[in-house]
Amino acid sequence: MRYEALLSPVNHLPIPVRRVTADARVLMTDFGIASYDAVHAASAAGAEAIVTLDTGFALLPSAQLAIYTDRSRLASCRDKRPR
């Protein structure tokens, strides 16, 4: 109930994990991204950016997904980001 209330004002599309499993596996293998981050990144396919406090997404190339984060995590993201 709370989950639906939280999402109700936001345009969203539920994506079953089985639809992104193969893509998540590639992200984990190619970029060393954690499984839960890989599922989120694979679900965001086609999106230009993600807003997150999780610096694990910085392992992805910037061409694949832009990251918006707060100042306290910026240095960590830059250190992890492939060049």
Image (tube, rainbow, N blue to C red):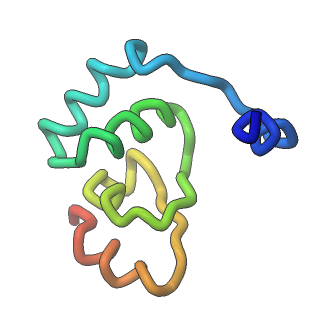
Q: Image quarter for residue 4?
A: top right
Instruction: Tell me what residue is drawn at x 21 percent, y 30 percent.
Output: 26
Instruction: Give the vertical position of 32 relative to 79 (above or below).
Output: above
Q: Residue furthest top?
A: 18
- Relative placement, left or right, of 6 versus 39 is right
- Relative placement, left or right, of 81 versus 71 is left
Badge count: 0
Q: Residue furthest front?
A: 1
* Quadrant (top left, top right, bottom left, bottom right) of the N terminus: top right
Q: Which residue occupies the foreground of this view, 11 or 8?
A: 8
Q: Which residue occupies the foreground of this view, 64 or 39?
A: 39
Q: Which residue occupies the foreground of this view, 42 or 9?
A: 9
Q: What is the x, y in percent for residue 74?
A: 41, 80
Q: Residue furthest right?
A: 9
Instruction: Tell me what residue is drawn at x 54 percent, y 21 percent.
Output: 15
Instruction: Tell me what residue is drawn at x 13 percent, y 36 percent.
Output: 29
Q: What is the x, y in percent for residue 30?
A: 14, 39
Q: What is the x, y in percent for residue 16?
A: 49, 17
Instruction: Give the vertical position of 50 relative to 5 (above or below).
Output: below
* Quadrant (top left, top right, bottom left, bottom right) of the C terminus: bottom left
Instruction: Give the vertical position of 21 relative to 74 (above or below).
Output: above
